[in-house]
Image: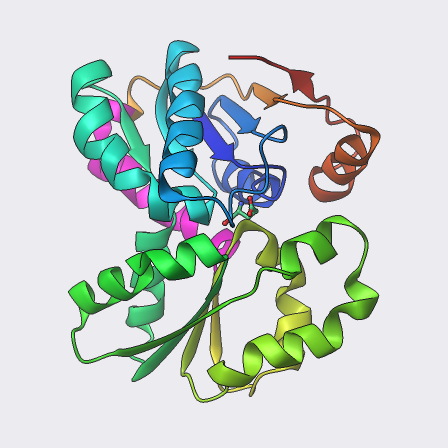
Amino acid sequence: MKIGIFDSGLGGLFLMRAIADAMPMYDYVYLGDTKNLPYGNRSRDAVYDLTENAADYLFKNDCGLVILACNTASALALRKLQHEYLPVNYPDRKVLGVLIPMAEAAVERRPSIVGVLGTRGTVESGVFIEEIRKLDSQIEVIQNAAPLLVPLIENDGLEWADPILHAYLAPLKDVDSLILGCTHYSIIKGLIEKFIDEDISVVCQTDVVPQKLEEYLKRHPEIDEKLDRKSNREFLVTDITKNFKELASEWFGDGIELELVTY
Ligand code: DGL
């Protein structure tokens, strides 16, 4: 069986690369729902339906474990998938998100105040606040939605990012840890760090999730022993354009072949 990595688009390729670099032996299948992106401004029901369809496709295609690299899907769809969809459809498979590992990493740094930058869907869900408070009820969490960042990153628009980042990060200037709660923000971690105090520790999914996944697989040998170890990689998308092909090469590396799928 394979490890499935799902994102609304191609930003999750950064996490796929970090995970595959940390654990190169497994077989991975990436699925980017490029036809329906962005998810960040959609309703809970819409994000759930799109994520369930994608997870269903990955499980039908021999994934033993699916990771929702998309923070918006992790925030709005993960719990229902785990509690309602999986027990009925694939009781022996697993679906994991990226919010809990990042909340854990932020809390491990013993902050008084944690900041969260994310899409509207992720911020409005309040899931980061809930997960951080489960770990330490005394921590204050300040969130800000940054809806303009994903389009800027995807459209080569970073030359216009400075005033936008300045405005999005201003309410988060007093935090101790800052969670970058979106697939795309790991790409601009260095740029974000220029706008915040150097004492703020930045929590980014590409730095955190691979190690947390490795630990998870050690704790769950019943999953780990089902995973194939032939180092195969597949890159599936629901729509292909010239821009998607260029972004995939830029973000994952030349030679990446996107395969169009429908489900
Ligand atoms: N993948 C999404 C996330 O991490 C960002 C892009 C989108 O809005 O679809 O929240």
Q: Residue 247: name its quadrant.
A: top right
Residue 212 is one of the magenta-drawn residues: yes
Residue 256 drawn at (x, y percent): 73, 27
Residue 233 colored in magenta in the image: no
161 or 186: nearer the viewer: 161
Q: Is residue 188 visible?
A: yes
Range of magenta residues: 204-223
- Above or below residue 26? Residue 145 is below
Q: Is residue 1 visible?
A: no
Quarter of the rendering containing residue 77: top left
Q: Position of residue 8 (x, y in %)?
A: 54, 37
Residue at 35 percent across and 69 percent down: it is 106
Return the residue nearer the eye: 107 or 76: 76
The residue lying at 56 percent from left, 41 percent from top is 12
Q: Position of residue 109 (x, y in %)?
A: 34, 75
**Relative to 41, 112 lies left or right:** left
Q: Is residue 193 left or right of residue 57?
A: right
